[in-house]
Amino acid sequence: MRFILTFLSGLLLLTSCGRHFITDETYRKTVLEDLSAKDEVMEAAGIDLDSMGLSLDELEAMQFLYAYMPLGDILNHEPSYFLDHYRLTRRALREMPWGSRIPEREMRHFVLPPRTNNENIDSARYVFYEELAPRVRNLSMRDAVLEVNHWCHEKAIYMPSDRRTSSPIATVKTAYGRCGEESTLLVSALRAVGIPARQVYTPRWAHTDSNHAWVEAWVDGEWCFLGACEPEPVLNLAWFNAPASRGMLMHTNVIGKYDGPEEVVSRNALYTEINVIKHYAPSSARMTVRVVDCNGQPVQDARVNFQIYNYSEFNTVAYDMTDSEGKVALTGGLGDMMIHATKDGRFGFTKVTYG
């Protein structure tokens, strides 16, 4: 009975405008604390969420977005843009058959956010929903993910572009994009129809130069991967299956203070970086590094860089600061990394082999 009541509570969250968007009181307090750091900027921009006459769930959704959005988004977009964005999200979750099955955490962090990368945010959610909803509303969630990717393949092909990621609609208009832009397009399209999605990125391949980005979609309780705009008949199949199985790090940035099961690489005021290497590399393992001084005593707050040899140099793919025991840890795939530690002008380095 407890499970049934919990499920119905989540269902009411998505269908009623008077319920909490964030049901966890502790997390709501965290969001409000983080939002308070934006008070000065929001006041200068003339934004007062409390005076907008919002329902409870709308207010909490807006508080979450404003607490963790970049300052440029606060200054460059009217509050009505983000309110409409939430209402479109709520509509998709109400009208799509899988909407009531999506947990609050996945909805909050992987459906609601309008931003995937550093692209300009636009009206993609409305435009994409109007075109995609008729194509997927009678499909299973798994088939809907595949169909959305087919739709993206109809809209854009791979072609290198400049370093700034184009917006989803701009990619559709030009009909091309690099992997970062194709995956941004697919994430936006999946979220438009209420399917949790995230962009996954390997900062450097372990076996060859360069890098790559693709997409993970949450399907009935599990994260599955697919190549963006590269349609396949099933999920978890792409040209990069073999390279990814030898990868050293696959990660994604999640808006806000995400509290999911994945390993946290780092946190900042806007997002949580998580490590998803276990989805790809069967030999992945956690490596603990301990930094000591000349006398063998642990060094706290040393910066430890985890580096992969790529493009004839050691590229940092992750870093962390040592704890009171001089330790940091990172899960990686099968291969070698250079570990480089620094503090107060002193340094140390060594090669380690994962797996």
Image: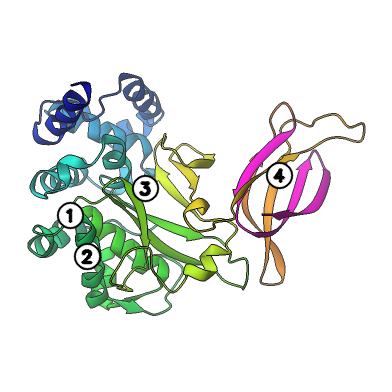
CA separation in Å, label 3 and label 4: 31 Å
The residue positioned farthest toward the right in the image shown: 295
x then y, percent, for residue 64: 30, 34
Instruction: Point out residue 55 in the picture as x, y percentages from the top left corner.
Output: 12, 28
Residue 343 within the segment the image draws in magenta: yes
Q: Is residue 295 above or below residue 127?
A: above
Q: Vertically, is 300 above or below 165?
A: above
Q: Which residue is mark 3?
A: 72
Q: Residues within 10 Å of mark 2 (few under 14, many from 20)?
A: many
Give the foreground label among 3 and 4. Answer: 4
Q: Which mark is residue 148?
A: 2
Mark 3 or 2, which is nearer the eye? 2
Tag 4: amino acid: Val
Q: Residues within 10 Å of mark 1 (few under 14, many from 20)?
A: many
Q: Amino acid at mark 2?
A: Val
Specify whether residue 46 is in view: no
Q: CA distance from mark 3 to mark 2?
A: 30 Å
Query: CA separation, marks 2 and 1?
Result: 9 Å
Q: Secondary structure at mark 3?
A: helix
Image: magenta residue range: 326-355
Q: Are marks 2 and 1 in contact (CB under 8 Å)?
A: yes
**Residue at figure coordinates x 20%, y 67% from the top left:** 147
Q: Are marks 2 and 4 in contact (CB under 8 Å)?
A: no
Q: Residue at x 82, y 45 (%)?
A: 347
